[in-house]
Each structure stands twice: as structure tokens, then as C-alpha cells.
Image (spheres, helix red, strand yellow):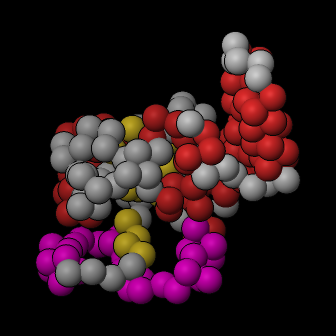
Amino acid sequence: KKGVDILLDAFQEVNRPDLHLVYVGAGPMEPQLRAASVDRTHFCGFVNQQQMPAAYQMMDVLALPSRGPGETWGLAVNEAMACGKPAIVSDRVGCGADLINPATGWTCTADNVESLCCVLASLPCREDLRRLSSGIRLHIAKWSFEWQLRGWTAAIESLSLSSRCLCARCIGQRARLRDSAQRGQLPARRDVL
């Protein structure tokens, strides 16, 4: 699902001496990956969630070339970006459309070694990658709970302004929704309808 085998194939094909491939986590493909790995390929094994910030700081780029289906978002991308790291994602990673742009990372075609090779071959040097860090942190900051809450509030206010019904029941319901959103309580689905 995560495309870790494709990542190893692309890494080996590109063969850039300045790149290292580090696998963080354990899974059923680990023995196969270890058997096929080459120099500059490293395996950290399982890393506790509390230790993940240190793992993100160790890397220069996160790679998530998932095949799908099932990679509905790719939360690891958010986490890496919060640490100022750019990401390589496949076009099947849900967050790609929202989070990845030329200043935050790269997109490759899912299940396509050549596409991933092109991205790996074109990665900037380590110093240039580090220069992206502050912009990436600013970009991902927009995906905080507060940012989402402002979006909900704006949507509710937009609905309130465009609504034609001016009966007391509808006006009251819109006011309750707006107040809930401002208090940080997202409305239940039935309240939105």
C-alpha cells in the first residue's frame, strides 16, 4: 500500500551518492526490502509515535509513494511538514492536492518507478532543501484546528447570508451553529442540513 518497494527500486535506479534511504517503521515487507537493499539504505524499525518528531528531524525529505487505495490522507505528510520537511507523495495520497505545491514537495505517479526516479533525480541539494523549511511550516500551519474552525465559521456565515428563510426557527438555528463554531464545537452532521 505505501509503495516502499517502489521507493527502493527508484532509489537504486537513480543512484545518487548524496542520497540515503531510511525506512522508519516495521512491516511485512521489511525482510524483502532488507534482502534487496543496497548501500545507503537504512532500517530504523518501529518508532514510537512520541519519537517521530526526532525521526522527521533526521530526514531531509519524507517519501510516501503510496499505491492506494486506502491512503485517504497521509497524516505523516502533515507531521513531516510541521517539522519543516518537504514531501514526495504519489498522486494517490489524499493530502497531495491540498498540501503539495512546488514550495512544499513533489508528486509522482503511483506505482510508477520512472516517475519516482524523476523526482528523486531532481531533488535539490541538502542546503536548498533546508531553505524550504520555514515556508513549509507556514503552509502547514493553515491546517490547524483554528484554521479549520475559521473555515467552518465562514461557511456558516455564508449560509446565513444566502439563506432566504427568515423565520425565527431558521434564524435561531443559524445563530446556534455560528455560536457553536466560534466556541470550537463543530456541528453534528444533522445540524448542518
Stretch in magenta: 29-56
Quadrant placement of the C terminus: top right
> Which residue is located at x 81 percent, y 28 percent?
168
Residue 61: x percent and y percent?
A: 51, 55
Q: Is residue 79 magenta?
A: no
Q: Can residue 136 be seen in this view?
A: no
Q: Does the magenta stretch include residue 40?
A: yes
Measured along the vertical axis of the image, is residue 86 above or below residue 82?
above
Quadrant placement of the N terminus: bottom left
12 or 59: which is nearer to us?
59
Measured along the vertical axis of the image, is residue 30 above or below residue 77?
below
Measured along the vertical axis of the image, is residue 127 above or below residue 109?
below
> Which residue is located at x 63 percent, y 68 percent?
57
191 or 104: which is nearer to us?
191
> Which residue is located at x 75 percent, y 33 percent?
169
Corner quadrant of residue 102: top right
188 or 84: which is nearer to us?
188
Q: Is residue 6 left or right of residue 100?
A: left
Measured along the vertical axis of the image, is residue 78 above or below residue 53?
above
Residue 182: x percent and y percent?
A: 84, 46
